[in-house]
Amino acid sequence: MGSSIATAGYTFVVEETKEVVGEDLGLLQEKLLQLNWGVQHPASGPMRLKVWVDGDEVVKVDPDIGYVLRLLEKLVEYRTWINAIVNVERACFMDDFGTMTGYSIAAEKIAGVEVPKKADYVRTILCEGGRIVSHLIGLGSFVGVMGVHTPMQWALIAREKFLDAFETFSGQRIATSSIVPGGVRYEPTGKFIEKMVVAVDYLEKEFIPRYEEVFVDNPTLKIRSVGVGKVSKEKAIEIGLAGPALRASGVASDIRKDYPYAAYGELDFKVITKEEGDSYARYLVIWEELKESAKIIRQAIEGLPEGDYRTKFPIKVPQGEAYVNVEWARGCFGFHLVSEGGTGPYRLKMRAPSFANLWAMPEIMKNVKLADVPVIFASLYMCHGDIDR
Amino acid sequence: MEIKEALMVPFEATKKVIRVTKALFAPKATEVWWDKGVKRELHYRGKHIIKAELCIGCSMCARACPVNCIEMVPTGVKKPRAVPKVRGNECIFCGLCEDACPTKPEKAIKLTDNYSMIVEPGTWDNLYQFVFEPEGLEEAIEKAKKMEEMIEKKKREALKKKQLEDKKGEEK
Ligand code: SF4
Ligand code: SF4
């Protein structure tokens, strides 16, 4: 470890070296200290951040991952085309619809199956519902790492309404396994639509105004986050940021707009971008996307066509490959699916946005203050589930 | 000032005692929910119900299960040759077995809105024995046996008839 730091151009003095400890105060100041941030730290989740600090300043950050590795990609190889969704959706429990949609579209591409229009619309509603649910927790945990836990509680109340709608649709609240190759598994009943409208109403009429009054444009929050972890547009592209973090640096990249899938091509929505590129901008992007998603849900419910919600998907799929990108809550999620003509996928590679953000993080965290580490970490909006997979 | 404070002490203490006693007899803030009959949504994916008399023993459910927790138990009769048994401990309640079941109009394997599944104590032995058994298996087997017997009888009768006819034909 010491040598890797030395090659990176930092002076690293091993703590045990006798001359340093207590004898020369001048040298002591140069000493780098390694802090272990995690594994159970509330701000980092099941992950260890090795943080080297020089006094109060962070010199280097090295993420240590793998604590929630479940071999999802490998497990998919032992599944059939339909029941592989249970592994795909477990990439992250917060927005499981996005991943299932991506996988299903890839499988349909290889098999050459056309999905009914209604299924596309239901997928859109569910994906946006998942995005809202995920963004709510993102907002809550961003303010949460600064020590204020009220927004998280408010967000969970709003989230609960969406989970109720998901339960009405699929019978489960979190692991819904509701989107399969060939469409969606259940009929979108009137009751589901009703519950979804109730949830969106609650979000727009109760949660958003109340939250906006207190936690957006909040001076204390701004002191902690404005200008912290700034990433310029060029830098963001260079280090490969994804999702809200990329859009907060002024890059208008959104798969829903660029390569429309499901019903996004027919709906009207904006891509939220901010120019500042700091933690606060990333927070605002998540915040504004929440409103945009609510709008998309309303449009999709209005435009919900009649007809079938599922077509037959063949048991054996011909040989082929497909690469599909979807705009997941945390960014662009890629699926590279390979078929060898069997009853299940031959190989699935998932390209996860959180993983990209994670390895951009050490770059962003150079020469920041120690207290800024959790703020930047939370603003990058990562999920451990899809970092490790 | 000090005297006043000292005078307040017993007063404060009584107040506290009263508050604690009140709290002791107040209704509980938390609810014990599982015996309250909380209704889940209609197609909530809970405990399985397997109806042996509907099952045709095709084992589609076992093949559809992503975690391989369905075991096909041989019945000893021809139809159904085997019926599913779900290891509840391993099941992830995805409902794909229900989707795969081909019986119409009612599925032989179904997930109900029964969500109270308590195994106590949760040792490995107990969890391993937590299995959703097929319902009405004995009756189904008996029925199947009777059916088989009947079919056998009919077959035998038909055979006898044929032989008789053959004999008659020979005699003529
Ligand atoms: S609900 Fe349980 S038994 Fe049925 S397919 Fe899913 S995991 Fe298997
Ligand atoms: S429960 Fe349904 S799918 Fe399973 S063996 Fe019986 S008929 Fe076939």
Image (cartoon, coloured by chain):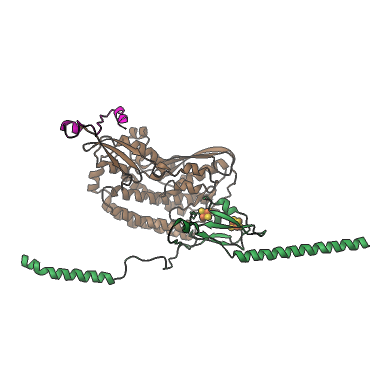
Q: Which chain is green?
A: B
Q: Which chain is brown?
A: A
Most frequent secondary structure within the magenta stretch: loop
Image quadrant occupied by the N terminus of chain B: bottom left
- Nearer to me, A10 or A347: A10
Is residue A25 a member of the stretch shown in magenta? yes
- Nearer to me, A166 or B168: B168
At which x and y percent is residue B117?
46, 61
Q: Does residue A362 lie above or below B23 as drawn?
A: above
The total number of labels drawn is: 0
Q: Is residue B6 left or right of residue A227?
A: left
At which x and y percent is residue A326?
45, 42
Is residue A133 a member of the stretch shown in magenta? no
Residue at 34% from the left image edge and 46% from the top image edge: A45
Q: Does residue A148 lie above or below A21 as drawn?
A: below
Residue at 48% from the left image edge and 60% from the top image edge: B44
Q: The magenta stretch spans which residues?
A: A1-29
Q: Is residue A326 left or right of residue A211?
A: right
Mark yes or no: residue A25 visible.
Answer: yes
Residue at 76% from the left image edge and 64% from the top image edge: B154
- Nearer to me, A106 or A118: A106
At which x and y percent is residue A186?
51, 55
Residue at 25% from the left image edge and 47% from the top image edge: A221
Mark yes or no: residue A262 visible.
Answer: no
